[in-house]
Amino acid sequence: MKTRFAVVLGTGLLLGGCFDAHYDVALNNDGSGTLVIDVVIDKALSQDILKEGKGKPGGEMPVKSLGKNAVESQRVENGSIVIRQSLAFKTLSDITASDVDVEVQDLGRNLVGVDRSRIRFGTGHNPVAPKGDKNSDFTSALAAQMFKGHEMRLTMHLPCVVERAETVKNGEALYAPKVEKSWFHGSSVEWRLPMSAMMELSRQQQDFAVTCWSFKGIPAGRSGA
């Protein structure tokens, strides 16, 4: 069952467009935090997998390990298999996955004495061949069609007040984030993009970024550093 499920993830999901991807990153003032990735498999495919596995999801996460102490779990929620990988990190350098890039830049203090930071989350989004020739362009376009109806969601929970959350541009389409902020509780920022749009982006990494301020500041750092 485990072998078959891995194959399903590699072909049925990546080329069949049968999942949503949810990223959730939470940062603390000391630079520690958590990173969680949920892959939510299409209900129809989930039921086929569960039927063959006699009610058990089984299988492996179709992304690289987030880090040394990453934990994987699986559950069934509303008929869909949810595969989760989570990592509690002390510093951003604990995140070692090559397809996730998290960075905090120290922008210094402003005139009123608050610390400003730029926080960027980058994720590799295109599992098919890199663009640049007719075959890979065709494969990317085909995969984008297959991913219709599914979404990629990124949520940042930050210990700072957001000044600016950058809008993601894809061709003529703009995807503005939803921002909730408080002087006392920090900020939450959420982007939602169609998976088809992620597949059509020409670059191999999509960045999501915010500029924010806080009285305590956030240590500068970068994943994998």
Image (cartoon, rainbow, N blue to C red):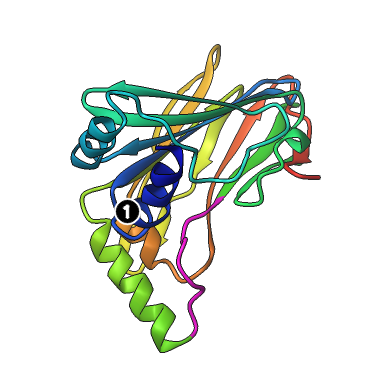
Q: Secondary structure at mark 1?
A: helix
Principal secondary structure, stretch drawn in magenta: loop
User: Is 14 on the left or on the right of 119, as rendered?
Assistant: left
From where the camera sits, is residue 196 visible?
yes
* Farthest-out residue, right: 225
User: Which residue is at a point 71% across and 20% down the rendered structure image?
Assistant: 29
User: Is 59 on the left or on the right of 50, as rendered?
Assistant: right
- The residue range painted magenta reads 123-132
User: Which residue is at a point 55% across and 11% down the rendered structure image?
Assistant: 184
Q: Nearer the viewer, residue 134 or 107?
A: 134
Measured from the top left, where is residue 19 in percent x and y? Answer: 32, 44
As for residue 124 lying within the magenta part, the answer is yes
Residue behind mark 1: 12
Res 135 quadrant in image: bottom left
User: Which residue is at a point 53% across and 45% down the rendered structure image?
Assistant: 63
* Farthest-out residue, bottom: 134
Measured from the top left, where is residue 3 in percent x and y? Answer: 45, 44
Q: Nearer the viewer, residue 41 or 90?
A: 41
Q: Determine crowd level at label 1: few under 14, some 14-19, many 20+ residues with C-alpha closer than 10 A.
A: some
Residue 93 higher or lower than 174, as above or below: above
**Tag 1: residue type?**
Gly
